[in-house]
Image (cartoon, rainbow, N blue to C red):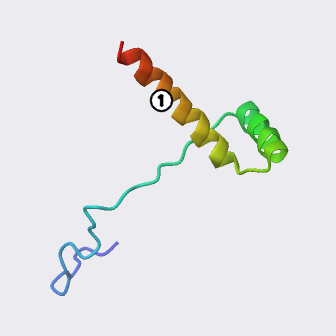
Amino acid sequence: MKKEYDFSKGERGKFHHPDAELMLPVYLEQDTVEALRKLSKKKGVEIGAIVNEWIRKDISIVEAIMSK
């Protein structure tokens, strides 16, 4: 590593994007992945579609419970 770096030609904020959305990875346990693979193959859809469907259902259940 250099003792000093020259940032005189640097541009502040060049790579900053305040409206950027991050897609965070979700790590599943192996038994869950295997079950999802079998189900997705059976239904002929992507694993992500099944997971999103399940999460949306769970969210609606939680919202219904919380609105009581």
How packed is label 1: few (under 14 Cα within 10 Å), some, or many (20 or more)? few
Q: Residue at x 37, y 17 (%)?
A: 66
Q: Quadrant of residue 12?
A: bottom left
Q: Is residue 49 above or below residue 17?
A: above
**What amino acid is found at the position of numbered circle 1 in the picture?**
Ile
The residue indicated by pointer 1 is 59
Q: Residue furthest left?
A: 8
Q: Give whichever of 32, 50 is nearer the camera.
A: 50
Does 65 appear above or below 29?
A: above
Element carrying mark 1: helix
Q: Position of residue 34 (x, y in %)?
A: 78, 37
Most extreme residue toward the bottom, as rendered? 9
Q: Is residue 56 above or below residue 24?
A: above
Does 28 sit left or right of 20 as displayed? right
Q: Quarter holding the N terminus?
A: bottom left
Q: Residue at x 73, y 35 (%)?
A: 30
Can residue 27 be seen by looking at this rendering? no
Between 43 and 27, the one lying in front of the other is: 43
Number of dots carrying numbers: 1
Can residue 57 be seen by looking at this rendering? yes
